[in-house]
Amino acid sequence: MAQMGSARSSTAAGGAQAEEKLRRRSAGSSGTTRERLPSGPLFRARLDSLKKNRPPFPWFALDIGGTLVKLVYFEPKDITAEEEQEEVENLKSIRKYLTSNVAYGRTGIRDVHLELKDLTLCGRKGNLHFIRFPTFDLPAFIQMSRDKNFSSLHTSLCATGGGAYKFEEEFRTVGDLQLCKLDELDCLVRGVLYIDSVGFNGQSECYYLKDPTNRERFQKIPYNLENPYPLLLVNIGSGVSILAVYSEGNYKRVTGTSLGGGTFFGLCCLLTGCSTFEEALEMASRGDSTKVDKLVRDIYGGDYERFALPGYAVASSFGHMMSKEKQESVSKEDLARATLVTITNNIGSIARMCALNENINKVVFVGNFLRINTVSMKLLAYALEYWSKGQLKALFLEHEGYFGAAGALLELLKTS
């Protein structure tokens, strides 16, 4: 009984400290209040969240990569009339801004087709939204968070990715926000396993491609990842990290490569003059890489039968470009396609070797490189199945590059 009494005293003390901390957060350096807040209801809502071991709204988290910032936001759909009455205006404004728009400024996009509906997180029901924008626009996001007075609602913000370290000082000095920095690979694994477990609005999150070389019969086939371990997780962002996952808390980074999505986009900018990732992919979809790459048949006149190398296999990426005549005959679209094939084939080859070395037969490819990139997915699907003689399938996930941000959100809720 004495211990229980002590625990109650400790909880009460913690609540008082939390209330005092919230009051301090709402005051500027001079001690004056930054915005007029309904102090009683606001702090009751804050303390109610603390007592129920969950953070106050809004719930969102960031994955700040080298090329893209990924943001996930939980929109509560079970707000009571009392909660709505006590909700401060800037919290309502944030929720309305994030959920009523599909575009933010010139470059921010909410991927409406990826929204997860009717989730229950920390006892609250709502929808999970997925938003992305280029990393070079992060300073504008930080300024917006200052303008919308995020700091009056959050004492800290969960973030992962290299940018959580790179931009930490800017978040603190400009946005008045303290970043809770999380390991990006921990968040990636946690996010993949969680989103696959809840599914994609009644459908499977995971799938593979059937007949990837056949344009007419090409289709996505759901795949049950219920027993995922061991799993080879290939994360293709600006660069590539490959993880061998044995359980949520037991994984290792097997290897990686610097030749990733950033390499494809950067080379396309140099070779074609394109200015966006989408433009680079669109050009690649119309190009012919065989005008740029030297194939086995260009060397042997056909297949290299002794080692079962088909004539259409790439023998030398960009091998035709040593010829001045060939250089003059290729288009920008051909160069974009060859760049995409080169990067993708390299990733597939490394992934297959890792799977063999680790004795793993489930290979899952994730990352924003695969967004709207069916060319690379088909290449990966065909290559893994062909070179493994059907023992390996390339598996893909619908939410591609958002798993790090999702894992960071789970950590926010877990550590509340």
Image: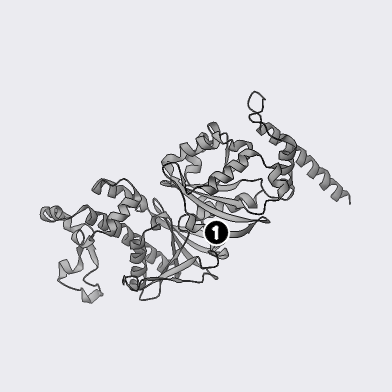
- Direction from residue 285 to residue 159 in the image, left or right: right
Q: Residue at x 85, y 50 (%)?
A: 4
Crowding at label 1, few (<14), some or many (≥20) Cα neighbours within 10 Å? some
Q: Residue at x 36, y 49 (%)?
A: 262
Residue that extends furthest to the right in the rendered view of this protein: 1
Circle 1: residue type: Leu
The foreground one among 100 and 17 is: 100
Q: Picture coordinates of residue 82 (x, y %)?
A: 73, 47
**Above or below — where is 217 with respect to 101?**
below
Residue 359 visible, this angle: no
Residue 254 visible, this angle: yes
Circle 1: element type: strand
The foreground one among 142 and 202 is: 202
**Above or below — where is 30 with respect to 7?**
above
Q: Picture coordinates of residue 92 (x, y %)?
A: 61, 43
**Above or below — where is 33 with respect to 375?**
above
**Residue occupied by mark 1:** 116
Coloration mode: one colour
Residue that extends furthest to the left in the rendered view of this protein: 325
- Direction from residue 87 to residue 375 in the image, left or right: left
- Direction from residue 341 to residue 56 in the image, left or right: right
Residue 77 image-quadrant placement: bottom right
Q: Picture coordinates of residue 328 (x, y %)?
A: 13, 52
- Direction from residue 351 to residue 331 in the image, left or right: left
The foreground one among 249 and 137 is: 137
**Above or below — where is 131 with respect to 143?**
below
Q: Picture coordinates of residue 130 (x, y %)?
A: 51, 52
